[in-house]
Amino acid sequence: MDILIIMGSKSDIDYGREVVKILKEFGVDYKIEVSSAHRTPKRTIELVRDAEEKGCKVIISIAGAAAHLGGIIAAHTLLPVIAIPVDSSPLNGIDALLSSVMMPPGVPVGCMAIGKMGAKNGAIFAIEILSIYNESLKEKLKNYRKEMAEGVLNSSKVVKEELE
Ligand code: RP5
């Protein structure tokens, strides 16, 4: 397993789906679990330790509200931890964003944007980390960027045809 994804609740599933979609596109080996930092703290730590033993290289944490999941995971591993703040609370994810991004110095959590944008970027960022030692993934990332650029050029043509 290269990537472990832990989400704080089953209700975070739509964000997990976004992450997994991209990991599958790139053929990355992952495992996904629901485990809460406050409701199942021991299990969360066990999952992190088990992932380390199984050769996991990056952990993605998906959580909303006062999202301490990323911080708790980071406290128990030296693996890079990417947090995706979920907009599941009345504060629309601002709480999750701040509690993930404002980690005190020494135990960093790499925090993405709130919601599905962050979920997509979290997956891509994890792949970028893996690609440091994986040429085939690096090639796939190059193609991904190329396709994005082609998409912009195509949309520019469409807009010109309609508006010029
Ligand atoms: C967090 O609180 C979860 O990550 C979720 O985003 C939010 C709500 O959880 P549930 O009450 O739906 O289980 O722990």
Image: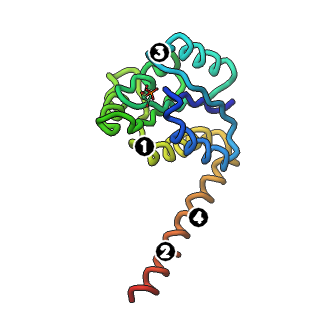
Which dot, 1 or 2, sits closer to the camera?
1
Q: Secondary structure at mark 3?
A: loop
Q: Amino acid at mark 2?
A: Ser
Image side of residue 6 versus residue 90, left or right: right
Asked whether disc 1 touches disc 4, contact meaning CB atoms under 8 Å apart, the reply is no
Q: Amino acid at mark 4?
A: Glu
Q: Secondary structure at mark 4?
A: helix
Residue at image point 49% right, 70% down: 152
Label 1 – label 4 distance at C-alpha: 23 Å
Which dot, 3 or 1, sits closer to the camera?
3
Please tell me the numbered disc located at residue 115: 1
Asked whether disc 2 touches disc 4, contact meaning CB atoms under 8 Å apart, the reply is no
Residue at image point 39% right, 26% down: 67
In the rendered structure, which disc, 3 or 1, sits on the residue that comes first in sequence? 3
Is 108 placed above or below 164 here?
above
Say if disc 3 is inside 8 Å of ligand 1.
Answer: yes
What residue is pinned by disc 2? 155
In the rendered structure, which disc, 1 or 4, sits on the residue that comes first in sequence? 1
Picture quadrant where residue 56 is located? top right
Q: Position of residue 134 (x, y in %)?
A: 67, 42
Label 2 – label 4 distance at C-alpha: 12 Å
Residue at image point 43% right, 34% down: 110
Q: Amino acid at mark 1?
A: Gly
Locate ligand 1 by image quadrant.
Answer: top left
Q: Secondary structure at mark 2?
A: helix
Label 1 – label 2 distance at C-alpha: 25 Å
Which dot, 1 or 4, sits closer to the camera?
1
The image quadrant where one finds the N terminus is: top right
In the rendered structure, which disc, 2 or 4, sits on the residue that comes first in sequence? 4
What residue is pinned by disc 4? 147
Q: Position of residue 129 (x, y in %)?
A: 56, 39
Residue at image point 50% right, 27% down: 9
